[in-house]
Image: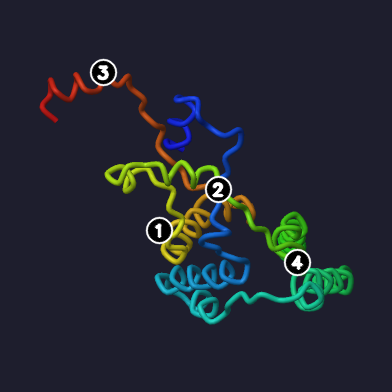
Amino acid sequence: MTLIAAAVIERRNDAVYQLATSVTNPCDMRRSIELTSLAHRKHYRAQEGIEYWLRLRLDAIPVSKERYNRMSAPAQRAIVRAIQIVAAPLPGRKAALAKAERSLERVEKLIELFEPFILLNEHDFVAENVEKLSYTLVPEERDQFSYNTGSLDWYEYWINIHIPALRRWTYPLIEGRPLEARPPRQLQPGNGAVAEEAKTGT
């Protein structure tokens, strides 16, 4: 972004810039599923209890849409709904069944939303305009400002940054749980903060 901003300031920019990795350092759907499973394994290994021990032994795998419909959320939701109908006259944990059905319905809607990107197409996004800017950098500026998608380690990013962030900020919303509380940010003017630090010696 700094590289693009500099080009805009010098008025030698292209009309459109796209930051993308799929041509030079792709991470396709199959690879992202594999990395997601590895990230979950890492999380479950750090937990205690039989539930996490069992989850540690279950992995997501890429499948066709036909198998997804036959074996995954749509079929599971149909089973839960059938159990609800049979168990309707009986006293019991109807709330748990209703909650399970709602959770599976949310999964179905998410899959439906992202289906064009994860199933129907193999997208290749090019980033030639920003790459051209990167090639014009002098050698001493390349380490800081070049657009180098090859330096992106998908394993490191997906397992240690992407999935932990989803687990903290997105999964609770999907599962109907409250987000982790954060202390309010204390904002101060830059000069005042520097002056206070200098005065107190911190």
Q: Secondary structure at mark 1?
A: helix
Q: Secondary structure at mark 2?
A: helix
Residue 34 is at least partly visible in this image: yes
In the rendered view, does 139 fall on the left or right side of 182? left
- The amino acid marked with disc number 2 is Glu
Figure check: 54 above or below 167: below
Residue identified by numbered label 3:
191
Cβ atoms at labels 4 and 3 below 8 Å apart: no
Residue identified by numbered label 2:
128
| Mark number displayed over residue 55 | none
Is 201 in front, or is 123? 123
Query: How is this picture coloured?
Result: rainbow
Q: Nearer the viewer, mark 2 or mark 4?
A: 2
Q: Residues within 10 Å of mark 3 (few under 14, many from 20)?
A: few
Give the image location of residue 145, x and y in percent: 37, 43
Cβ atoms at labels 1 and 4 below 8 Å apart: no
Q: Residue at x 46, y 31 (%)?
A: 7
Cβ atoms at labels 2 and 1 below 8 Å apart: no
In the rendered view, does 159 fall on the left or right side of 65? left
Question: Which mark sits nearer the N-terminus, 2 or 1?
Answer: 2
Q: Nearer the viewer, mark 2 or mark 3?
A: 2
Residue identified by numbered label 1:
151
**Which residue is situated farthest in the left direction here?**
201
Is 6 in front, or is 86? 6
Q: Secondary structure at mark 4?
A: helix
| Mark number displayed over residue 97 | 4
Q: Residues within 10 Å of mark 2 (few under 14, many from 20)?
A: few
Which quadrant of the rendered structure holds the C terminus? top left
